[in-house]
């Protein structure tokens, strides 16, 4: 993974070079963001180990889906509203469908029978309903109301979106922080249960100094912001040169950029017979996007 870090300076150079294919800029920036997003996650976890569960949970909630937020904001700044919306929808759907499905599939290949907590799934479903119900109301209005009536009430619908986003954003921050703490406790409990009879539980030590981890977090965020700007700016050229559509890029490709490492982690723990943690990672990411990122993007837009 670290080998692909070289793609970041290459992507920056290609963006400022003359007569460069926008498809090449998109591909290089796409590849560059994946390892940097992994470094961002690593730095966040290192800081979380050293500042405690409360501050660490808030930090994880803030930077857990930072790549998706940066890409969405970059799309809004360039007027690509559809790309911003489809990237958010793609993040929610990808974690609920292919990622969770891969957890069950690959976990089932290795283990004949697996179990998970019903309470965990019920809580996650409640959060998803809470997050997605307000989002679906404007969409339902556009489907059932006449275009002329809809146009006359367009300002009211926009005001509704803004009003919903104000309380939803802090609620999402709190829920995401609780979800991060729950994932950590779930993983710790599973590790303790599996290793109680064999060996003492090993305490994971931080690998970086706090100052180094904070610096890594800042640098990774800045580099991702540059790469995301180049990525979004080259979408028009990519769509013109290939059969891909903007909706496909937003729904399928953009969410892979920020969640590749997280997706792999969910499948890995599922193959290790820890379905509670796998479900927490997969559904928890969707909850963070639906409860936190969607309101923030609505407020920014």
Image (cartoon, rainbow, N blue to C red):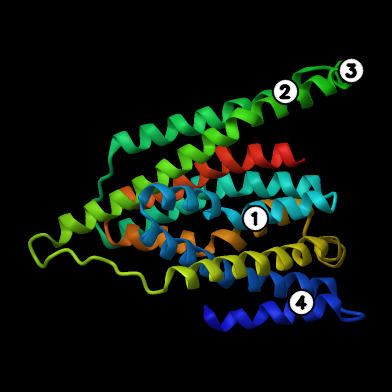
Tell me which label, 1 or 3, sits earlier in the chain: 3
Task: Point out the image quarter for the C terminus.
Answer: top right
Residue 278 versus residue 54: which sits nearer the camera?
Answer: 54
Q: Circle 2 — which element?
A: helix
Q: Residue furthest left?
A: 197
* Gap in angstroms between the C-alphas marked 4 and 2: 39 Å
Q: How dense is the environment of label 2, judged by Cα within 10 Å: few (below 14), some, or many (20 and up)?
A: some
- The residue under the point 37% across, 63% down is 268
Tell me which label, 4 or 2, sits earlier in the chain: 4
* Gap in angstroms between the C-alphas marked 4 and 1: 24 Å
Q: Circle 3 — which element?
A: helix
* Gap in angstroms between the C-alphas marked 3 and 4: 45 Å
Q: Which residue is mark 1?
A: 252
Q: Which mark is in front, 4 or 1?
A: 4
Q: Which residue is mark 2?
A: 160
* Gap in angstroms between the C-alphas marked 1 and 3: 34 Å
- The residue under the point 55% across, 37% down is 291
Q: Which residue is mark 4?
A: 12
């Amino acid at each position: 993974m670290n080998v692909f870090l070289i793609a970041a300076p290459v992507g920056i150079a290609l963006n400022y070079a003359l007569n460069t294919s926008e498809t090449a800029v998109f591909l290089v920036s796409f590849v560059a963001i994946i390892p940097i997003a992994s470094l961002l996650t690593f730095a966040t976890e290192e800081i979380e180990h050293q500042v405690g569960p409360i501050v660490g949970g808030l930090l994880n909630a803030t930077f857990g889906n930072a790549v998706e937020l940066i890409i969405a904001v970059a799309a809004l700044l360039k007027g690509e509203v559809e790309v911003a919306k489809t990237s958010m929808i793609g993040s929610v759907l990808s974690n609920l469908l292919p990622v969770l499905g891969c957890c069950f599939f690959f976990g089932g290949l290795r283990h004949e029978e697996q179990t998970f907590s019903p309470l965990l799934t019920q809580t996650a479903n409640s959060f998803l309903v809470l997050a997605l119900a307000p989002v679906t109301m404007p969409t339902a209005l556009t489907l059932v109301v006449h275009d002329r009536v809809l146009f006359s009430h367009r300002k009211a619908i926009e005001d509704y979106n803004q009003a919903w986003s104000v309380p939803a954003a802090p609620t999402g921050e709190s829920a995401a922080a609780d979800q991060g703490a729950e994932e950590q406790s779930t993983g710790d409990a599973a590790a303790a249960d599996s290793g109680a009879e064999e060996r003492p539980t090993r305490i994971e030590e931080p690998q970086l100094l706090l100052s180094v981890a904070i610096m890594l977090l800042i640098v990774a965020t800045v580099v991702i912001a540059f790469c995301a700007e180049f990525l979004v700016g080259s979408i028009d050229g990519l769509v013109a040169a290939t059969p891909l559509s903007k909706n496909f890029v937003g729904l399928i490709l953009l969410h892979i950029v920020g969640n590749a490492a997280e997706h792999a982690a969910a499948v890995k723990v599922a193959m290790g017979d820890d379905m509670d943690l796998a479900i927490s990672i997969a559904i928890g990411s969707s909850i963070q996007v639906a409860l936190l990122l969607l309101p923030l993007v609505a407020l920014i837009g």
